[in-house]
Amino acid sequence: MPTYLRVKTPVDGWIRIVRKIMSTGITRQDERNSDTRWLDNVMIHIMNPFDDRVSEIYPFSEKVLKEKYSTQLLNPDRLDFDYTYGERLNAWGEETINQIDYVISKLKSNPHTRRAVATTWDPRKDIQVDEVPCLNHFVFMKRLDQLDISVMIRSNDMYGAWPANVYALGDLLRYVSDGTNLMPGTITTLSVNAHIYKHDWESANKV
């Protein structure tokens, strides 16, 4: 059953969804035989994504999130990985399409467009390999005087990864906002499978 949370900050969203999954989530094994507790189609709408971004009890520091996650989203270099989000967003496919440049250009030419979209899924590769992107579909949309981002995430580790995802998305939103002279607004994530792994249950129960 879908879940909708309207939250003030990333930390507020993290605390609320972790507690909800631990109290009401369904338990089952995933494709890799890992035990998870999960909810389906969890939408979290973050009103102030740049306030209270990282909890003191979250496993990773803000410095790590900035260097490892945010920077990577705008780096087209795949390095030695099967894929990176930076590669898929800034150098997609054999054509090396820079989708972030496209988004900025589209919004500058028509601020009311509904086509400022970027995607990471590549069916030419991703239906044949084991490591595939979790964050799949990025939509930027102007609302009043600000720019919002909505992201569809097919599979989302809500305890370990969601705060890092949201932190990086905030910096991506700020980058596109700067490029379009718009104020950065809200972040909405739709996590189709929102889960917490068994190895994190003990820590999650303390959130």
Image (tube, rainbow, N blue to C red):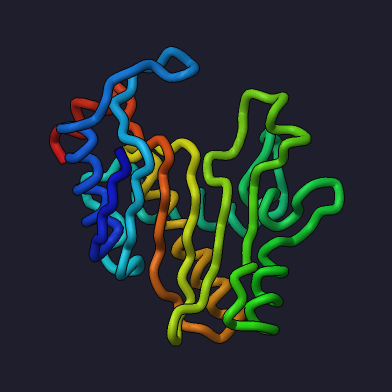
Residue at the (17%, 40%) spot, across then down: 19
The quarter in which the C terminus is drawn is top left
What is the residue that sits farthest to the right in this orientation?
A: 95
Image position of 57 (left or right of 139): left
Which x, y percent locates residue 168? 47, 57
Which x, y percent locates residue 45? 33, 60
Q: How many marks?
A: 0
The image quadrant that residue 17 belongs to is top left
Which x, y percent locates residue 167? 41, 57
The image quadrant that residue 132 belongs to is top right
Query: Which of the pair 1/58 is nearer the observer?
Result: 1
Image vertical order of residue 105 relative to residue 93, above or below:
below
Q: Is residue 64 visible?
A: no
Residue at the (55%, 62%) spot, across then down: 139
The image quadrant that residue 175 belongs to is bottom right
Image position of 139 (left or right of 202): right
Residue at the (29%, 68%) spot, across then down: 51
The quarter in which the N terminus is drawn is top left
Query: Which of the pair 43/196 is nearer the observer?
Result: 43
Residue at the (26%, 54%) spot, across then down: 5
Which x, y percent locates residue 61? 34, 50
Image vertical order of residue 194 relative to residue 172, above or below:
above
What is the residue that sits farthest to the front in this orientation?
A: 1
Q: Is residue 164 visible?
A: yes
